[in-house]
Amino acid sequence: MLDVLKGATVFPPPVWIMRQAGRYLPEYRETRKRAGSFLDLCYNPDLAVEVTLQPIRRFGFDASILFSDILVVPHALGRDLRFEEGRGPLMTPLEAEEIDGLNGDMFHVNLSPVYETVRRLRLELPAETTLLGFCGAPFTVASYMIAGHGTVDQAPARLFGYQHPEAMKRLLKILADWSARYLIRQIEAGADAVQIFDSWSGVLDERGFAEFCIEPVADIVRQVHAACPGVPVIAFPRGAGSRYTGFRKATGSDALALDWTVPLDQARKLQQEGPVQGNLDPQRLVAGGKALSDGVGTILAALGDGPLVFNLGHGITPQTPVSHVEQMLREVREARRG
Ligand code: CP3
């Protein structure tokens, strides 16, 4: 996996899946019940290590992703956060006047359980399993801080960016700086590579994409590369569409995670400039059978002769049967070059 992130072609490709520790696994649901709340699970190294390892034990994925959430960053800056069953994250909506009150004095103290989880994972994981750290991209994190909850199109965050351009700029810069420090600490604790999740970059207009997505992501990548040369950074600007083209260069990221709507001929062009990750539709994994085989086969045929990390185009959904994950792994791992 690390070789691929540095540009090598490996076939069959390494494979992991976004949200691989999650509710589709009975052992996750069991541990989650023991933890109490979702955040208790994120901040308890014993349990966070346990759920991170569960999909590795069961499936032997080539990469393991730290179990946490992107919203622990604003939480560590003093914003309140809770997760309600069936409603996702809930925060008190951030007002423009509150931005200067974001306080990083306790940031690394608050996140020390996460660093401890990474340290223990690197010790417990097989040496050949790549350990991924992660953070949310500033715009995606800001959209939950501003709206106070998930929305379908992040209208509150877009409006905030237009009505309070200076405040938005300051907020994204604060998030970029703390996110970079957060990733650097994860790397120092043992993460081999990191991924920046910009799940909502796709809702932005051209100028918004440049200012709210590209600029802050490039800022994080620059800081991480300066502190940790040689550690690959994967960027995931979900929904970026035609704007995936040029994104690697504009942000300095090493690898591009592609959502499932990216056409494979575009993906091949992106792959000529460096590694790509993705991009199976998670609903093909829910469907299984031929729909799944078709999806796996097409991706391997289009992207198998370049640097590819096989993955989904977004997180696995809770209703996915475990047997379909097994089918996917079998088909990727038994694939022969056509
Ligand atoms: O990939 C992994 O296995 C690592 C863990 C991980 C989680 N969240 C665990 C989680 C990662 C990398 C994330 C990132 C994350 N969190 C993103 C970016 C990626 C994406 O999916 O777009 C976002 C937008 C969030 C914010 C968030 N966290 C939402 C919107 C929700 C609710 C949605 C849901 O599925 O319920 C969460 C909760 C969450 N984060 C869960 C998990 C396993 C489910 C909560 C539970 O177990 O009760």
Image: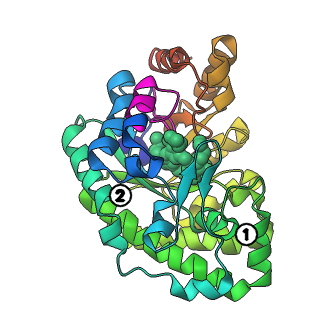
- Tell me where residue 293 sits by quadrant: top right
- The residue that disc 2 covers is 231
Q: Give the answer, above or below, for where 135 lies relative to 40.
A: below
Q: Residue at x 42, y 43 (%)?
A: 36
> Three-letter amino acid code at disc 1?
Ala
SS assignment at label 2: loop
Q: How many marks?
A: 2
Q: Position of residue 175 (x, y in %)?
A: 52, 74
What is the magenta range? 12-32
Task: Please determine whether, in this image, residue 73 is positioned above or below residue 48.
Answer: below
Q: Which residue is mark 1?
A: 157
What amino acid is found at the position of numbered circle 2 in the picture?
Val
Overall secondary structure of the magenta stretch? loop
Are discs 1 and 2 less than 8 Å apart at CB? Answer: no
Tell me, yes or no, whether the highlighted magenta stretch contains residue 241: no
- The x, y position of residue 132, in whole percent, is 38, 48
Q: Is residue 257 visible?
A: no
Q: Is residue 338 left or right of residue 150?
A: left
